[in-house]
Image (cartoon, rainbow, N blue to C red):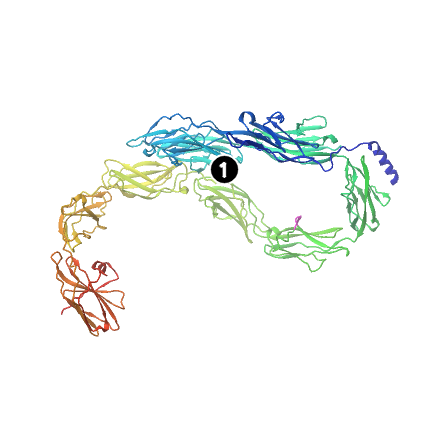
Amino acid sequence: MLHYSAFFLCSLLLPFAALQSTKGPTGGYGPVFEEQPQNTLFPEGSAEEQVSLSCRARAIPPANYRWKLNGTDLNLAENSSYRLIGGNLAISNPTQSKHAGTYQCVASNSFGTVLSNEASLRFGYLQEFSPEERDQVKITEGQGIMLPCNPPQHYPGLSYRWLLNEFPNFLANDSRHFVSQVTGNLYIARTDVEDEGKYSCLATSHIAFTTKSVYSTFTPLLIIPGAEPRLYAPSIKVRFPVETYTLAKQSVTLECFAFGNPVPRIRWRKVDTSQSPQWFASDPVLHIPSVSFDDDGTYECEAENSKGRDIYQGRVIVQAQPEWLQIISDTEAKIGSDLLWNCAASGKPRPTIRWLRNGKPLASQARTEVINGQLKITNLHLQDSGMYQCVAGNKHGTIYTSAELTVQALAPDFRLSPVKPLIPAARGGEITIQCNPRAAPTPVILWSKGTELLYNNSRVTVTANGTLILKNISRTDEGNYTCFAENIMGKSNSTGILSVREATRITLAPSGSDINQGDSVVLQCHASHDPTMDLTFTWELDGLPVNFEEEYEHYQRASADESVGDLHIINAKLRHAGKYTCTAQTVVDRTSASASLLVRGPPGPPGGVVVRDVKETSVQLSWSRGFDNHNPISRYKVQVMEPETEIWKTAKTDPPTVEGNAESALVVGLTPWTDYLFQVVASNILGVGEPSVPSSLVRTKEAAPNVAPSGLNGGGGTPNELTINWTPLSRQYQNGDDFGYIIAFKRKTDDIWQTFRVPGVQSHQFVYRNETITAYTPFDVMIKAFNRKGEGPYSLETTIYSAEDEPNISPSKVKATAISSTDIEVEWNSVSPNNGVLLGYEIRYWKAGDKEAAADRVRSPSLNTSAKVSGLKPNTLYHVTIRAYNRAGTGPPSPSANVTTSKSPPKRPPRNISWTLSRSSINIKWDQVVAMKNESPVTGYKILYRLDSQLTPTLYATSKTRAELPLPEGASHVTIQLCATGKGGDGEPAEVHIPKDSGTSMMVENSAPPILTQAQVINSAAVLLLLKCFAV
């Protein structure tokens, strides 16, 4: 039977034996680009004399190269400026007129041809500004102005700066100044006198590593001063295009700048969003560094000041260059088979797709079908081999993906995939034996056991692809099995030996368990097997292998016996529940047993949180039940978060408790016009579960404000004004857009209230001016907030006084008395407060013969009606006046008082100091000090007495020329300073150092530096003043 079948197969294939396989060199392949040309910008006038476009392809045999310019082949032989270096194209002395354009590299070898990406060569340049003088520009102070740059011809774009008067004094962009990087023009929102000067535009070109800058001639700017610059609403002067096209992943910059007085504030928002538009930038330039399709939309620029606002809108349209979603790859196909290649690309606009074979367009014909990104070739021939390219392009670029098709014709060959030499199989089991020779076209496959051909029956199956399947194997199936393969190119065979072993069986299967989260359990699994083979156990959970390495804290194997594969589950989590499968396997067979593990625990996260029926202070929330994890859900808790806080809080609901059978709740107590996220948490007797995925961001509806502004106060300012201040309400209390404040006030004596509206969230002051307002008039003032939904409640009434005026009453009965050579005491009668709150009194004093305008001034820190003035000159006549003052200034002067300071104190220290020591005292005496004519008379003496053990000296005073001072037991040394004193103050001191064992001594004359003067003694809190008079 075997011989007859073989003869029939030979007869069937014989007419094709003469066909030959046409193939390229062994081991070769077509070109694959490793370097491709890139877009190049070459600076005109560059010192470089050559530009090079790269092209290198990996290929065996090596590739040949040629180039195209604007789609036409370059004839390098006829143009000496082009040279081919390897695959690179070198261009000598490049010029705009001859060499600018789009270049493409073509690489070829015997396997096919491929085209590179297209690359442009462009030339960058920047010409000089016109040398003509620019006209002077005049503008009234406070108005806005634009100074045009008028840059010279250039490519590509430039960066701009402006110079004021001289180099390098460059203007910086601030709230008043803006330099457009689109036009180069300089804009000043509100001119000031200091803006006057000469302005020059600096344009800079950045090409590769070269930078070039050119200056314009100066434009003189003359500012015409105005008495009071006019306030006016913003007017946007710098506007970005109505439509701005940009590419994904690139950056986009929008400019917006306005004139106005006060200087307008600029801010941005995207208006066509699903949520309420939010302001997100406050700068004349909105820069998006890496654009995505989410950035596509309409953007609004708003310029606002206290006089009004101006808005402008434009659209950003995001498009994209082509990007591959699916590419083709090298394919080896059998002769006569079919080829199906697909490629796909994303892009905006949507790319068109075309196909190339060996660099030439490929269209549908005969066996070839081209439909957009799909290429199908049926009944492949050897000549279909070659290099194929899928090309995707839109107006933003073109991309290529390449692959090589190799059509094969091969006789069957088992060298790379022979039948397994030894094929073990388990008794009673099933075995699959593969037969996969390398062959083209697909061969006819036959199987034999020994010399007997095998045919399909209940135990034997030969599949269409040549695989042999044996079922219910017994010992009689052992033997040699041979696979025969034959096609038009030849034939071959391969043999393996089948060996039958004992089957593996589960002897103790795992059983189902029901546990709580945190418990542990053992799933048992024992098995028997053929002793000549090794047995291994594996475990799966719901069809996936148990990961013992990552979950070592929860999973452990039993390893005491080879036939035992128990699984220990420790501190079980909810994720450990499911169907566990134990598999015992050898190299020839495997058997499995399964059991379910039920883990009870807290509920899983609820799903599908949806917010609806959004109102001012409430929303209706609904959700779907999550897994109860085998314990009924007892209740739900709703949590709420404001995005800026990033803190989840428990929300108030109505009713307060949400039962476990509920799937909705009314959330109350929210703030109007506020963004919220919501999530729901379920709980049962085993604990609290994980929260749901947060809801989409929602904003509660607007409502009239319900909180009055705080911090109401005021006062001050200039005469005839009432100044009212308050603390602006924060975002959470505004409750809506178009926000502002309403001020209500009246005189204390009036019954009619006046009201004024102050727009603007950040407004914090209102000044009411009226010539009828007298100084320091009390007003009752209230404030409330408003928005476009209505007005809020008024605050409590607060008394605020109008601006103060200077006092108009002068103090009386001014009296000045000399208390030393440098100090005087001034007294006066108080003044009744008028025109404001009296803060104190100002003392002005000046020497006789000087002008009052040069008087020195001292302000009393309180409302006391006496004060001491120090630092005067001895024996000098002074004039003194007193004025009352408040926050508005000082009042009229009092009548002047005259005072002459005392003469200077005696300069000479006491002399001939002597002392006598006893057990408990020191008796000290000295010569009387006689004052000079220019000194004040001596009225007494002061003694500063310090023991060696004391840190603080003691002060004694006497009118005599002797004193008895105490000498405590244990004192070893005494220091004494002695000075004369009089109406003019204290004189120079004499210092004496007295050891306790000195007995009786005398110091004839000793003048010491003023270690501690009178002033220091009086002003030091550390000195204990004990005044004693000693009677002799």
How crowded pointer 1 is (Cα within 10 Å; few <14, some 14-19, many 20+) is rated as: few
Which residue is painted at 35% across and 27% down in the image?
A: 136
* Residue 830 falls left or right of residue 549: left
Q: Quadrant of the C terminus?
A: bottom left
Which quadrant of the view contains residue 717? top left
Amino acid type, label 1 = Pro
Does residue 392 show up magenta in the picture?
no
The spot of residue 415 in percent (x, y) is 78, 43
Q: Quadrant of the N terminus?
A: top right
Question: Please, is residue 509 above or below residue 367 in the view?
Answer: below
Mark 1: secondary structure: loop
The spot of residue 675 in percent (x, y) is 46, 41
* Any part of residue 79 in sight: yes
* Residue 463 falls left or right of residue 604: right
Which range is magenta?
A: 541-545
Instruction: Determine the main secondary structure of the stretch shown in magenta.
Output: strand
- 890 or 363, which is in the foreground? 363
- 747 or 769, which is in the foreground? 769
The spot of residue 384 in percent (x, y) is 72, 30
* Any part of residue 379 in sight: no
* Residue 902 falls left or right of residue 254: left
Q: How many marks?
A: 1
Does residue 544 show up magenta in the picture?
yes
Question: Please, is residue 620 above or below residue 45 in the view?
Answer: below
Question: Please, is residue 479 above or below residue 409 in the view?
Answer: below
* Residue 248 falls left or right of residue 951: right
* Residue ID for mark 1: 289
- 55 or 32, which is in the foreground? 55
The spot of residue 279 in percent (x, y) is 44, 37
